[in-house]
Amino acid sequence: MKTALLFGASGQIGAPLLERLNDAGWRVYAVSRQPHSDAPGRHWLQGDFAGVRGLPDGVDAIFSCGPLDLFARWYADAPIRAARIVAFGSTSAATKHGSDDDHERELARRLLGAEASLFASSEQRGANATMLRPTLVYGAGRDATLTRIAAMAQRWGRFLLPRRSDGLRQPVHVHDLAAAAFAACAAAATHGRSYDLPGGETLPYREMVRRVLASLQPARPLHELPMPLFRLAVKTAQARGIAADLTDAAVARMREDLVFNLAPAQRDFGYAPRAFRPEARMFERAVPARD
């Protein structure tokens, strides 16, 4: 029986990955900050990257669905042995490194630094690491973008965008990411490599938002405003404590293409993400898992 250590096991990607591993007959040491009851094939460990009690001496694979920089720091000093490491990062490492926003540039710097650190540590320890970079994640009601858009539209009865919000996007479902992590773990071609994981459809930002609004019950309308009027609406909302982190850089990116190539992942481990067909249940806010 293969064994795995899974960080973020109750999170939006970790939960479906845990199910997939169990279904395949793996025994999983599942890490979460919250207590959970054991079940056949899974043993829960309470903790996080700052400390986990009861770690085994070794496993066949370590999967990380949590913050990449924290995982890379943990792994550098972790006593556990594992031949395979599969960790999730983010395409933000590429899209935000040249941002006008200081916080976004710092995020990109941390992600890139963590990737380099993880590969260096794994090589030093004789393990084979694979890095997975999702685009815009959705599907479990825990993401900070599409679920948030749905919640705001439901609250206000509509949603606003600036005109010409035609930057291309590739939203990716959490179950496709779980499948990717599982498949990549078994593929020797992925050793020491990073992969972008876009969704199976490329569409304009406003069309992506329109589909989310159309999926709600009842559906909500999309209103497009001239950019000056939209910025005024944002400032008004922020004065009321709403959309505080909707920065000028984030607004500008609505008109920028953020497109990634799925061909390498498709070639090396059969990555086949679904098209974007949102349903209301995908944006029902789940209680955040503190992973």
Image: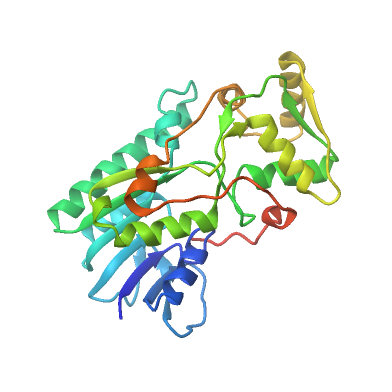
Residue 73 picture location, percent across and down: 29, 52
Residue 66 picture location, percent across and down: 43, 55
**12 to the left or right of 155:** left
Q: Nearer the viewer, residue 284 or 229?
A: 284
- Which residue is found at the position 66% from the left and 24% from the top? 165
**130 to the left or right of 280:** left
Q: Give above or below for 40 relative to 198.
A: below
Q: Give above or below for 105 relative to 28.
A: above
- Which residue is found at the position 50% from the left and 55% from the top? 176
Q: Give above or below for 197 relative to 36.
A: above
Residue 238 picture location, percent across and down: 71, 30
Camera sees residue 76? no
Identify the image quadrant of residue 155. Answer: top right
- Which residue is found at the position 39% from the left and 40% from the top? 263
Residue 172 picture location, percent across and down: 54, 47
Camera sees residue 37? yes
